[in-house]
Image: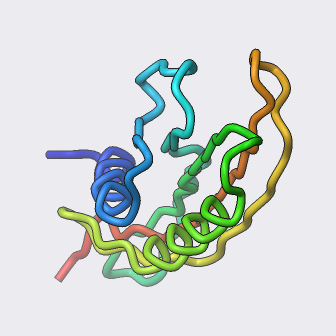
Amino acid sequence: MISPQRDLVTSAIQTLNVITDVPVFDDTVDNDTDYPQINVSTGTTSNSQRSKNEQRSSYTLYIDYFDIKDNDHGLMMDTCFSIREYLKYLRLSNYICTSLAFNQTETTDTSTDQSLWHVNITIDYYITEKAFI
C-alpha cells in the first residue's frame, strides 16, 4: 500500500503537470540547472484523532517554484495562483484529504549563477489514514 506522504506528492505532481508546462520534480530528483522548475516535497507530520472511528494526520506539502529573474514575473504569479487554487482541492488516489491553510513567500535567490525568483508555497492537509466502521 502507498504511504499517505507519497500519495500526497504523487497527486500534487500529477495536478501540477496538468495546470502548467513548467517541469515538476519531487524532492528525490536533483535538477538545479534548468529554470523555470517546480519542486514538490512533504515535511512536517503530526498525528491527530478526530473521532474514535478514524485516524487523521496532518501533513505539509512544499512547492518551490524557481524562475530566472529576467523572465515574465506576471506569468509566474498567475501560475502560483493556479497552483494554490487547484491544490486546495487536491484529491489523493488512496486517501481522503482536506486542505487546512496555505502560505506563500517570495524571495530572490542568488545562490546560483543566475538571480532567481523563488516562490515557496506551503499547504497543510489533514489526511484520513484509517477509518473504522
Q: Is residue 129 above or below residue 50?
A: above
Q: Is residue 87 above or below residue 46?
A: below
Residue 57, x across and y down, in percent? 47, 62
Please tell me which residue is depicted at 53% across the width and 63% down the height of the picture: 58
Residue 119, x across and y down, in percent? 71, 51
Residue 66, x across and y down, in percent? 64, 41
Please tell me which residue is depicted at 76% across the width and 15% down the height of the picture: 113
Residue 88, x across and y down, in percent? 49, 77
Please tell me which residue is depicted at 55% across the width and 65% down the height of the picture: 79
Is residue 129 or residue 123 the one in the foreground? 123
- In terms of image quadrants, where is residue 18? bottom left
Q: How many marks?
A: 0
- In terms of image quadrants, where is residue 81? bottom right
Is residue 13 or residue 7 the one in the foreground? 13
Please tell me which residue is depicted at 75% across the width and 18% down the height of the picture: 112
In the rendered image, which quarter contains the C terminus? bottom left
Q: How is the image coloured?
A: rainbow
Is residue 64 or residue 99 the one in the foreground? 64
Q: Is residue 114 left or right of residue 23?
A: right
Q: Is residue 6 left or right of residue 24?
A: left
Is residue 2 or residue 103 the one in the foreground? 103
